[in-house]
């Protein structure tokens, strides 16, 4: 995680980013108690990915792998990289930065990194009809959050693990963040797994550079989105995500057969 990201704070009071050990210690949160949401949208299909660690050292493993990748490729990197030259650079600039001179192998390299991480993913997809009214935003957020948390609750029941405590999502401004928070607070007590999930707080990362685990979640969401657009195309990142997918988020049920909002 960059120094800039470590100094940033989520927009919910009392929460701290994963990777900042001092802040996590002050709030009583260990790194493994923090999970991350990634998002992508294309052709009116919204994708949300929940990424959580399955062992305490998961985010440290990610930071070490990223640092090692940067060190190995430091001599190959351009001194002045072209920003936005790849979709991976747009959604995960810190992770993809060392690969700016070898985009042909970048996807496979990042897929290998993700495949080796001790993490799991849950995915939710909502197909939006642009002819519908804007009032459907709350329903879309409800479907996406419920889909991810339902799969996560299934994982908890099968693994006997305790739920993480903080779920960090990308920020989209005060109004939309307030809507998502209101939807989440209203929805959570009515979920089947509310007794396991009830202590999870939702917070939003500010506009600063996101932490590395959020970049992983964003990469995963973008990979799923790209798979939905072109399912026949080779997509190693999608395959890496699918290998870590927690049921019941099965990809065979996606692609035009998701809930409409």
Image (cartoon, grey):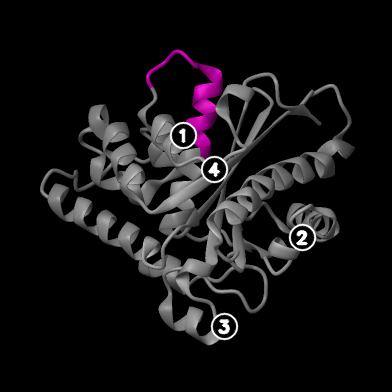
SS of the residue at dot 2? helix
Quadrant for the N terminus in the image: bottom left
Query: What mark, if any, has residue 246 been given in the picture?
Result: 4
Asked if residue 140 lies left or right of residue 8, the reply is right
SS of the residue at dot 4? loop
Query: What mark, if any, has residue 25 been given in the picture?
Result: none
- Pick whichever of labels 2 and 1 is earlier in the sequence: 2
> Looking at the picture, how far across and down is residue 102, in whole percent?
21, 33
| Residue with the mark numbered 1 | 242
Of the residues tagged 1 and 3, which is closer to the observer? 1
> Looking at the picture, how far across and down is residue 109, in whole percent?
26, 38
Q: Is residue 11 magenta?
A: no
Figure check: 61 above or below 77: below
Mark 1 crowdedness (10 Å alpha carbons): few <14, some 14-19, many ≥20: many
SS of the residue at dot 1? helix
Q: Magenta part mainly helix, strand or loop?
A: helix
| Residue with the mark numbered 2 | 194
Query: What mark, if any, has residue 27 been given in the picture?
Result: 3
Whether residue 254 is visible, yes or no, is no
SS of the residue at dot 3? helix
- Disc 1 to disc 4, C-alpha distance: 9 Å
- Pick whichever of labels 3 and 2 is earlier in the sequence: 3
Of the residues tagged 4 and 3, which is closer to the observer? 4
Highlighted range, magenta: 221-234
Quadrant for the C terminus in the image: top right
Figure check: 204 above or below 46: below
* Residue at (42, 78) in percent of width and height: 21
- Disc 3 to disc 2, C-alpha distance: 23 Å
> Looking at the picture, how far across and down is residue 49, in whole percent?
57, 43
Mark 3 crowdedness (10 Å alpha carbons): few <14, some 14-19, many ≥20: few
Asked if residue 149 lies left or right of residue 117, the reply is right
């Amino acid at each position: 995680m960059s120094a800039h990201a470590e100094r940033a704070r989520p927009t919910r009071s009392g929460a701290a980013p994963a990777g900042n050990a001092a802040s996590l210690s002050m709030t009583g949160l260990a790194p493994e108690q923090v999970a991350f949401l990634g998002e992508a949208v294309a052709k009116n299909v919204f994708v949300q990915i929940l990424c959580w660690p399955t062992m305490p050292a998961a985010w440290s493993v990610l930071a070490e792998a990223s640092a090692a990748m940067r060190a190995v490729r430091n001599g190959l990197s351009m001194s002045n990289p072209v920003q936005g030259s790849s979709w991976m650079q747009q959604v995960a600039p810190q992770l993809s930065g060392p690969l700016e001179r070898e985009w042909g192998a970048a996807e496979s390299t990042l897929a290998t990194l993700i495949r080796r991480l001790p993490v799991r993913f849950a995915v939710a997809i909502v197909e939006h009809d642009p002819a519908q009214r804007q009032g459907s935003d709350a329903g879309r957020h409800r479907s996406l959050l419920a889909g991810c948390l339902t799969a996560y609750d299934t994982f908890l029941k099968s693994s006997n693990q305790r739920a993480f405590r903080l779920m960090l999502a990308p920020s989209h401004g005060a109004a939309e963040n307030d809507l998502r928070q209101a939807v989440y607070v209203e929805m959570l007590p009515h979920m089947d797994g509310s007794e396991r999930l009830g202590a999870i707080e939702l917070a939003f990362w500010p506009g600063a550079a996101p932490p590395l685990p959020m970049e992983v979640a964003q990469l995963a969401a973008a990979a799923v989105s790209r798979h939905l657009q072109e399912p026949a195309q080779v997509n190693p990142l999608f395959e890496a995500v699918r290998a870590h997918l927690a049921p019941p988020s099965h990809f065979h049920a996606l692609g035009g057969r998701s809930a409409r909002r």
